[in-house]
Amino acid sequence: MECVFGLVGNGFAIVAADTSAVHSILLHKNKEDKIMVLDSHKLVAASGEPGDRVQFTEYVQKNVSLYQFRNGLPLTTAAAANFTRGELATALRKNPYSVNILMAGYDKEAGASLYYIDYIATLHKVDKGAFGYGSYFSLSTMDRHYRSDMSVEEAIELVDKCILEIRSRLVIAPPNFVIKIVDKNGAREYDWRITTVDA
């Protein structure tokens, strides 16, 4: 019952993800961070099979770092998204990854952006996006309340509305969420929304 969603505001992008590590009917842990800091100004929120999700996001992270090390320049968010899409497309014909990605980033020239990349290597630049069962509720909530000129406080309020809808309407709703933000000051963790603590 994974839930990953994000949106772009006025000079920033926010992504949120549930933190449940689930297999079949078992909940293994409540603090699995599914949002990776790709570099100083990029975030990757991923959903999918746990092994594929971890391995593929780490692979992308290391290759983005390698590019910066070799060339002395970081990839733009658009370039990182296109690299990720290319790797998913190549794997699709060999050994496909079951992973869906929202990539958020901030570039000096382009500003904040959000890219939607699914497991069959579809790439779209979006203002708001979501994956998982929670997307049914978060997308409709964002359709109703989203504005492109939102402040950070307004965007966090919208994220909280999405989390509330997911928790109240999804049959097996994830209890905990992590929220991360990227803007001109870099990528960082913003907050957690916790209702259940691991024993």
Image (cartoon, grey):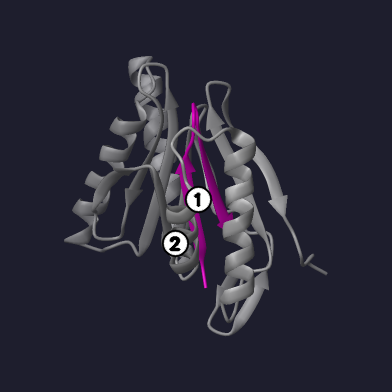
Answer above or below: position of 168 versus 53. Answer: below
Using a 10 Å C-alpha cutoff, classify the residue at mark 2 as few (fewer than 14 neighbours), some (14 to 19) or many (20 or more).
Answer: few
Q: Is residue 10 above or below residue 48?
A: above
Q: Could one spot residue 68 in this view of the protein?
A: yes
Task: Look at the image and tell me in which quarter the C terminus lies.
Answer: bottom right
Q: Earlier in the sequence, mark 1 or mark 2?
A: 2
29 to the left or right of 41 = right
Q: Is residue 11 magenta?
A: yes
Image x and y of residue 159, in percent: 58, 51
Span colored in magenta:
1-18
Q: Where does label 1 land, which residue?
A: 145
Left or right of residue 35, residue 100 in this image: left
**Residue 19 seen by the camera:** no
Could you tell me residue 147's position as x and y percent? Answer: 46, 41
Amino acid type, mark 1: His
Residue 41 in percent (x, y) is at 49, 28
Q: Residue at x 38, y 29 (%)?
A: 66
- The residue furthest left is 93
Which residue is identified by label 2? 140
Asked if 113 appears above or below 19 in the picture, the reply is above
Estimate how packed mark 1 is, as few (under 14), some (14 to 19) or many (20 or more) residues with alpha carbons within 10 Å.
Answer: some
Quote the CA–CA distance across marks 1 and 2. Answer: 9 Å
- Residue for point 24% across, 54% down: 121
Q: Find numbered disc 1 in the image and state the secondary structure of the residue it sits on.
A: helix
In depth, the one of 125 and 85 nearer the eye is 125
State the residue in front, 152 or 16: 152
Camera-side residue of 132 and 53: 132
